[in-house]
Image: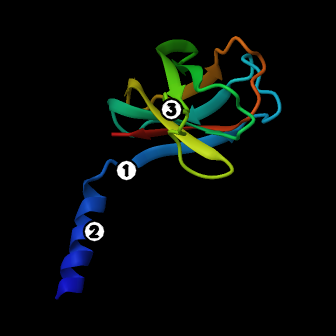
């Protein structure tokens, strides 16, 4: 009986969470990620119209030498920019402790502002860094997760 109740609870919690309808990542050049080489994500033909939650994540190594990473995320629809957000990803807190998880590649997450999506439209999302040090070293992946 307890096993059934536990399994039912886990199933209920899983069903109530926002499941992503789009979750992708792209590799960056770990040695040299240039500001003019954005991570690009193609989102084809949305099934519904709604406001999507946008979660951006970065995977980095100890080669990345700063405590934050500044990014710009831009979405296009029909070759026009429809959404832009400037993000600051905090990698280490004031005491020098990592805010991410994992080893030797550490993942860091940040939320962007919600993005409006229209049924039947296709979107392209670009994420690039805007750091003064160009290129940046130690960033291995960039990803996004969209959910309702």
x and y percentages locating residue 99 in the rendered image: 50, 39
- Measure the alpha-carbon separation of dots 1 and 3: 34 Å
x and y percentages locating residue 16 in the rendered image: 25, 54
| Disc with the residue nearer the chain's start (1 vs 2) | 2
Q: Residue at x 69, y 50 (%)?
A: 104
Quadrant of the snapshot with the N terminus: bottom left
x and y percentages locating residue 11 in the rendered image: 27, 68
**Element at badge 3?**
loop
3 in relation to 122, above or below:
below
> Where is residue 91, by image quadrant?
top right
In the rendered view, how is the structure colored? rainbow
* Residue denoted by label 1: 19
122 in relation to 20, above or below:
above
| Disc with the residue nearer the chain's start (1 vs 3) | 1
x and y percentages locating residue 28 in the rendered image: 74, 35
Q: Nearer the viewer, mark 1 or mark 3?
A: 3
Q: Residue at x 78, y 36 (%)?
A: 30
**Element at badge 1?**
loop
Numbered badge on residue 114: none
């Amino acid at each position: 009986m307890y096993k059934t109740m536990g399994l039912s609870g886990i199933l209920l919690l899983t069903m109530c969470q926002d499941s992503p309808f789009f979750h992708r990542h792209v590799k960056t050049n770990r040695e040299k990620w240039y500001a003019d080489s954005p991570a690009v994500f193609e989102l084809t033909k949305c099934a519904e119209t709604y406001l999507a939650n946008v979660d951006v994540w970065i995977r980095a190594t100890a080669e990345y030498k700063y405590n934050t990473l500044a990014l710009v995320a831009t979405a296009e629809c029909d070759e026009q920019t429809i959404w832009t957000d400037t993000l600051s990803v905090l990698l280490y807190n004031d005491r020098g402790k990592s805010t991410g998880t994992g080893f030797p590649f550490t993942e860091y997450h940040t939320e962007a502002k919600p993005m409006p999506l229209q049924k039947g439209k296709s979107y392209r999302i670009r994420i690039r860094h805007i750091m003064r040090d160009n290129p940046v070293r130690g960033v291995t992946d960039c990803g996004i997760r969209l959910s309702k």
